Image (cartoon, rainbow, N blue to C red):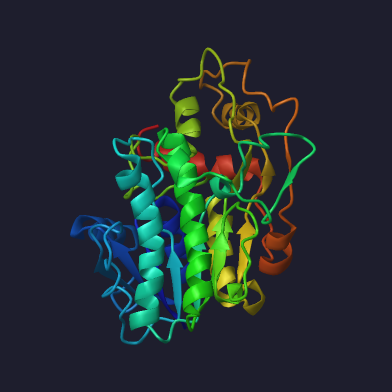
Amino acid sequence: MTRVLVTGGSGFIAVHVLEALLAQGHSVVTSVRSETKAQMLRDTFPNVGKEKLDFVYVADIGQHGSFDDAVKSDPPFEWVIHTASPFHFNVTDTKKDLLDPAIIGTTGILKAIKKNAPNVKRVVITSSFAAIFSPKIGNRPDHTYSEKDWNPVTEEEAIQDPMTGYRASKTLAEKAAWEFVEKEKPNFQISTVRHPKDYTRTFTDKIAKMNPPMVFGPIHPKLQTLDTLNTSNQRIRDMMLGKMADEIPPGGVNIWVDVRDLALAHIRAAERPEAAGKRFFVTAGYYSNRELADYVRELLPDVKIAAKGGEFPAEYFKYDNSRTKEILGINFRTLKDMVRDTIPTLKAIGA
């Protein structure tokens, strides 16, 4: 049994990480913003006692020092899985609402671990395909995106609009993590789960990072409402509610992953020695909104969904997820299986 800290425990990805860790018998502490969030998680896992699932309160990850006490534990933590970061476009101040929580939250927890949690051996950080995708390259079919790619966005460009700000927050937070490891030479190793460019330096065997694209999959009904769904699952919700009866919109980012596979990738990045110091582009592959709609229609024949729109783009980039398959051993679920498992959970909250 390993003692694990998971940040942002009520988030869509984080709760699946919690669920997988608990199923494997680990002892987990998760950070939440309030007692209300903690109680929602207790209600989600009603048969799990305090010795297996406990809570620390971090009201604002964008504040310096916010994780200083959260990383302290008896017995001590061995792994930290840092998922807490904003993903929304309801932004009034890009720096305050997106950049600071992502960058200060990431560097803040690394500083806190180095200072107060000497037993931590591995830190896994959730990033995003937004940190890999380059607007300058775009969807060019002659380009293959992999862990070697980085979004070239700058902090100056980040304040232009919320979408650029979100992509910048993921990119700059991840780069800050690798820079921290290089400069501070901490006792722990890190991995990142996401989609950026290779930022490997002398001491990158200290981290692992995850870089996922669109993240679909079952929700936990006690934690979400139709209005608070993660952005990806809103597409399935809208199909179920008949909001795509006239036309299916374009997919935008046409690569995806099931949240349960992504959660497992986080855990394997923490437990496998060969994952240390690496980024992981975690994707199951291509999809289109049309394909998504076809599966929803097949499972819910009474729902009205348009027969036009949502096709896969005529030209699109290639991807390389071989590192995730080879090192983490992830066998990705199919899109149809994801839709089949997700629909009942959305029905449970009124879809």
Q: Position of residue 167 (x, y in %)?
A: 49, 43
Pick the front one: 254 or 158: 158
- In the image, is 102 to the left or to the right of 322? left
Pick the front one: 152 or 293: 152
- In the image, is 219 to the left or to the right of 44? right
Residue 186, above or below 190: below
* Total marks placed: 0
- Quarter of the image for the C terminus: give it: top left
Q: Position of residue 146 (x, y in %)?
A: 70, 52
**At x 63% / y 60%, what residue is drawn?**
280
Q: Position of residue 208 (x, y in %)?
A: 56, 68
**At x 46% / y 56%, what residue is drawn?**
173
**At x 56% / y 24%, what residue is drawn?**
301
* Residue 46 visible in rendering: no
Residue furthest right in the image:
142
Pick the front one: 286 or 58: 58
Q: Position of residue 68 (x, y in %)?
A: 28, 74
Residue furthest top in the image:
246
Among the 4 quarters of the image, the one containing residue 308: top right
Residue furthest front in the image:
156
